[in-house]
Image (tube, rainbow, N blue to C red):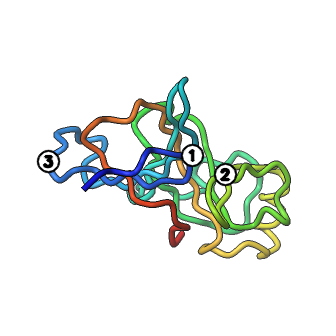
Amino acid sequence: MEKPPLAKGNFLIAEPFLGDPNFERSVVLLCEHNAEGSFGFVLNQPSALALQDVWEEALYVDFPLFVGGPVEQNTLHFIHRRPEVIEGAIPVADDLFWGGDYEQLRTLLNLGKIAAHEVRFLWAIRAGVPDNWRASMPKTPGL
């Protein structure tokens, strides 16, 4: 069976015996893929921290924080389904967006206008795509 070409919005699923503990049993959302490289987030690795542990400004609600990957873990990112209320969001797939205005997001979180199923907070990952990953067809994931 021929693999579909990699593209923004694809999901990469780690092969069972990948041999890299950073990606073992990982599902990665590919946010960018071009001749200069690839950028994505591991979606299924919860961290021991919560959003309040890393957000410097006042935050009156708490959300889980996921480990988005092994590289550049000093940066906070988010994917979401609310581009109509978060300016600057970058489309990744149908009904799925990356980033946007953090101040708007903080206000919306504090007012209870963003639900947990509409946003996921992640540390960053920046790496090449290994040959032993496979891409599924682009679909909107359950956040």
Name the amino acid, label 1: Cys
Crowdedness near tag 2: few (<14), some (14–19) or many (≥20) residues, C-alpha within 10 Å: many
Crowdedness near tag 3: few (<14), some (14–19) or many (≥20) residues, C-alpha within 10 Å: few
Q: Secondary structure at mark 1?
A: strand
> 25 or 134: nearer the eye?
134
Asked whether the residues under the numbered discs 2 and 1 touch, taking CB atoms below 8 Å apart as contact, a structural biologist would say: yes
Name the amino acid, label 2: Trp
Taking the image as shown, residue 54 lies to the left or right of residue 129, namely right
Relative vertical location of residue 123 with respect to residue 83 in this rendering, above or below: above
Q: CA distance from mark 3 to mark 1?
A: 24 Å
Q: Residue furthest front?
A: 2
Taking the image as shown, residue 107 lies to the left or right of residue 24, namely right
Residue 26, horizontal then vertical, whole percent:
33, 53
Q: Secondary structure at mark 3?
A: loop
Taking the image as shown, residue 110 lies to the left or right of residue 29, namely right
Look at mark 1 in the image and give the residue it sits on: 31
> 83 or 4: nearer the eye?
4
The mark that comes first in sequence, 3 or 1, is 3
Residue 75, horizontal then vertical, whole percent:
59, 37
Residue 132, horizontal then vertical, whole percent:
24, 41
Give the numbered dot on residue 98.
Answer: 2
Q: Identify which residue is drawn at 54% across, 50% down.
A: 122
Q: Identify which residue is drawn at 22% across, 50% down.
A: 15
Look at mark 3 in the image and give the residue it sits on: 17
